[in-house]
Amino acid sequence: MSIISAKKTSFIIFLFIAVCCFAQNYNIDYYGIVSTEIDSNMSKMTSDLYYTQLSEISNFNVSDKRESSVITSEPEFSSFSLSNLSFYTVINKDKNSDRWITTFHVVDARNGEEHTKTKQYDSFYKILMESKNELKETIKQLIENDKNATAIVSSQTFDSSSPKTQESSLFSTESLAGTWSGEDSIQKIVILRGGRGFVIFKNGASMNITIELDNSNSSNIIITQKGRANASFFPELPRNLALNAALSAPPIQWILHADGDNNLSGTKITLIQDGNSYKSGEIQVSWQKID
């Protein structure tokens, strides 16, 4: 073997070792596909296909988090891990044509980020025919927040001609994204870019929330419980009262304002004890950003 050939061989081996050693590995929780417009057999087949393709990608460590092969609603954000990325896909039929619209979601709950990318297909068959490499590249774009993917950074838009634009931008849902703490009964609050998030209570309960800015007062941040009430959402109440309250309780709501870069303070509108019963009341709260 010539010296030049030996050097080329050594260089190729070096590159191979470098790729193997330094390629980024991703831990991904797979939640399946969400659709109400395809039958159960097609839904299961597509969901299984995506899982198989993801599992075959060398630097993707995929955990199957599907509760069912047929899913008709998006997964609860409170179920997402703070240590892994979460991936799911929403598939809908275009109302104005025969095309199918697929929206890929990658959620990084730890950093409070959600990224999406939407593709259109002329037929459902073409969704099934998409190659593993194309799926890999789509997800990598989302993970790395590539410019070709669309990041959900805020659920609010502001009129650039408004005199309050500069003040309002300080309180965007993007700037709130991250992990928060602050209430005795709450372990942590995770706010995602895009105005969604979840609360994890110290008693183990979890609550999905929405985050928005008050249209009448842009300095107010309104955080609202999403979904049905749970007795564990009222740890300040005796258990028997909490169980009864959960049957008809209105959504818990926080009305907060920024108190510095990493602090929120304001009131929590919830149920409080009233003798042997309960009533709606306000509690003063303060949150601190921890990550």
Image (tube, grey):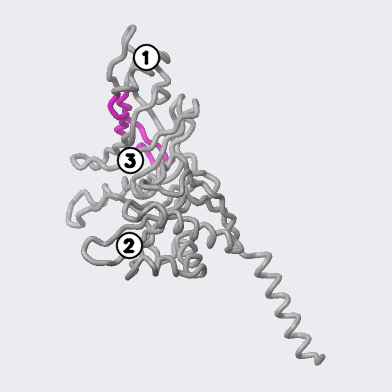
Q: Label 1 is placed on what type of residue?
A: Leu
Q: What is the spatial separation of the Cα atoms under label 2 and label 3, in whole angstroms? A: 25 Å
Q: Which residue is mark 2?
A: 101
Q: Which residue is mark 1?
A: 241
Q: Work out which residue is located at the far top of the displayed protein and give it.
A: 275
Residue at 36%, 65% in the rendered image: 124
Q: Label 3 is placed on what type of residue?
A: Thr
Point out the tag, 2 or 3, that comes first from the N-terminus. Answer: 2
The x and y percentages for residue 246 are 34, 22
Q: Does residue 260 lie above or below 129 as drawn?
A: above
The x and y percentages for residue 196 are 36, 44
Viewer-nearest residue: 112 or 285: 112
The x and y percentages for residue 51 are 52, 57
Q: Label 2 is placed on what type of residue?
A: Ile
Q: Is residue 69 magenta?
A: no
Instruction: Specify few, some or many for label 3: CA neighbours under 10 Å numbering under 14, 14-19, or 20 or more.
Output: some
The x and y percentages for residue 53 are 53, 62
Point out the tag, 2 or 1, that comes first from the N-terminus. Answer: 2
Q: Is residue 51 left or right of residue 165?
A: right
Q: What is the spatial separation of the Cα atoms under label 2 and label 1, in whole angstroms? A: 46 Å
On residue 210, the disc is: 3
Do the CB atoms of the residues marked 2 and 1 lie less than 8 Å apart?
no
Do the CB atoms of the residues marked 2 and 3 lie less than 8 Å apart?
no
Specify the quadrant of the image occupied by residue 103. Answer: bottom left
